[in-house]
Amino acid sequence: MPTQLVDTPEYNHPDQIPAPLTAVQSPRSNTVSVKGGSITRPLIHTLNIQEQDIAGFPKNVSDYIVDKNWWLPPEVHANYPNLKSLVQHVALPADASQDKLVWKGSADGELTAKIAYDFKRHHYPILSWAKTVWCIDIPPSKSLVAWTLMHDKLPTDENLKIRGCNLPSICSLCYACEESSFHLFFEYLWKLCDRGWNTQCKLVIKSTIVNIINMIWLARNNMRFNNIKTSRHSAIAFISSNVVLSGNKTKLLASGSIRDFSILKYFNINIHPPKAPQIKEVIWCLPSHGWIKCNTDGAATLVTSSCGGIFRNYLADLVCCFAQNTSQGSAFHAELCGAMSAIEIAHRFHWNQLWIETDSSLVVKAFKNDALIPWKLRNRWSNCNCPLRNMNVIVSHVFREEILVLII
């Protein structure tokens, strides 16, 4: 059934758009049309098209596809010369498939309750210290006080006044000034965690800070509500016992640093030495006679991603190589594009005996399970499966050091 290009509702503000649903993955609907959805946004917005300007144009996406390729009528190309370059970025599947709606915010295109909740919930800013406070080796009750402090929600006199509770304020520990979170807890205490400690020592320092905050708050409450003054020795003993408990229970490892060793021994914490490294010999294996071997790799940053590959024959002679930008995407996106490019190039040169080696185990699993393929690449993946029916292809995982040796 051809996909009709329906009118989309108008919104006065981007926040009013309910959900990023896009109809894709079909030769009849890739939502790249003069009026419907598009690669990233409706083309009527991208090209600044007015409704009356497209009243006489065909309404089905399938009308713009001929012999599994995009085709634009001359009048469309004349009025909108940038449209051709936009639609060429969308891969059309070689085999006909059913139209479907995909959720642009998920890798597989499926909408789950978790993704829907994450889309609708209020997103708070990511705090650099959040993961520092919470740790599996520190009791949650201790971390909760530190978490509440960092959000400035502890019921100190300063915060109680903000909530409308007017009372005379004095610090119950020093009796010298008004009580506030900044006065009770030093603002720059957390910077101690970022001084290049080993993982076990960093956990001990983190636990010390969290337990100091917890002890200060506990001493304050004991003095204010129970009239019990906590002695310095008992406070130190309480902090030390909790730090030793966290330091000994953790699975994190120490290093050979004398500085870190001294800190751990000061708390009488057992040193967790790192495991002896396992040395594995990595050898690039030649393909059999008549086979072509391609080693692919991919990488991604926050703004772009790219992939590349090297083809060698059974004599280890370089026969072909490629490198290409894969636009913005994850490392898996880049690795998968590298494997698909290897298949496309091998099919073009009639190399029907192909061995693909990649350092991504997820790519190897994707050849066994199509559900791992991101929805943005499913059309291209489906097209790559067609030549695979007439090819002998081996896909294997290899350590990245072998790829480095191959390039050198």
Image (cartoon, rainbow, N blue to C red):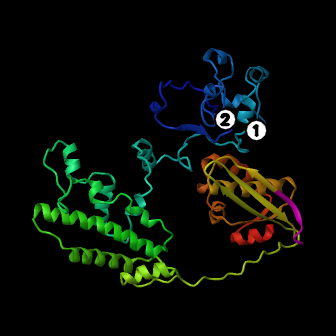
Q: In the image, what residue occupies the spot 60% across and 82% down?
A: 277
Q: Residue furthest left?
A: 227
Q: Is residue 317 magenta?
A: yes
**Residue 53 drawn above or below residue 277:** above
Q: Is residue 48 magenta?
A: no
Q: Residue furthest front?
A: 176
**Residue 71 drawn above or below residue 143:** above
- Taking the image as shown, residue 190 lies to the left or right of residue 372, namely left
* Residue marked by disc 1: 68
Which comes sooner in the sequence, label 2 or label 1?
Answer: 2
Tell me which corner region of the image, top left, top right, bottom left or bottom right, holds residue 390. bottom right
Q: In the image, what residue occupies the spot 36% across and 57% down?
A: 187
Q: Which mark is residue 28?
A: 2
Which residue occupies the foreground of this view, 238 or 380?
Answer: 238
Q: Amino acid at mark 1?
A: Lys
Tell me which corner region of the image, top left, top right, bottom left or bottom right, holds residue 92. top right
Where in the figure is residue 101, as x and y percent of width and height? 55, 40
In the structure shown, which secondary structural element does the residue marked by tag 2 occupy?
Answer: loop
Q: In the image, what residue occupies the spot 22% across and 77% down?
A: 233
Q: Amino acid at mark 2?
A: Arg
Q: CA distance from mark 2 to mark 1?
A: 10 Å
Marks 2 and 1: CB-CB under 8 Å? Answer: no
Q: In the image, what residue occupies the spot 45% across and 76% down?
A: 200
Label 2 environment density (alpha carbons within 10 Å; few <14, some 14–19, many ≥20): many
The segment highlighted magenta reads 314-321
- Taking the image as shown, residue 381 lies to the left or right of residue 109, namely right
In the structure shown, which secondary structural element does the residue marked by tag 1 occupy?
Answer: loop
Q: Is residue 297 visible?
A: yes
Where in the figure is residue 31, as x and y percent of width and height? 63, 34
- Quarter of the image containing the N terminus? top right
Where in the figure is residue 20, as x and y percent of width and height? 52, 38
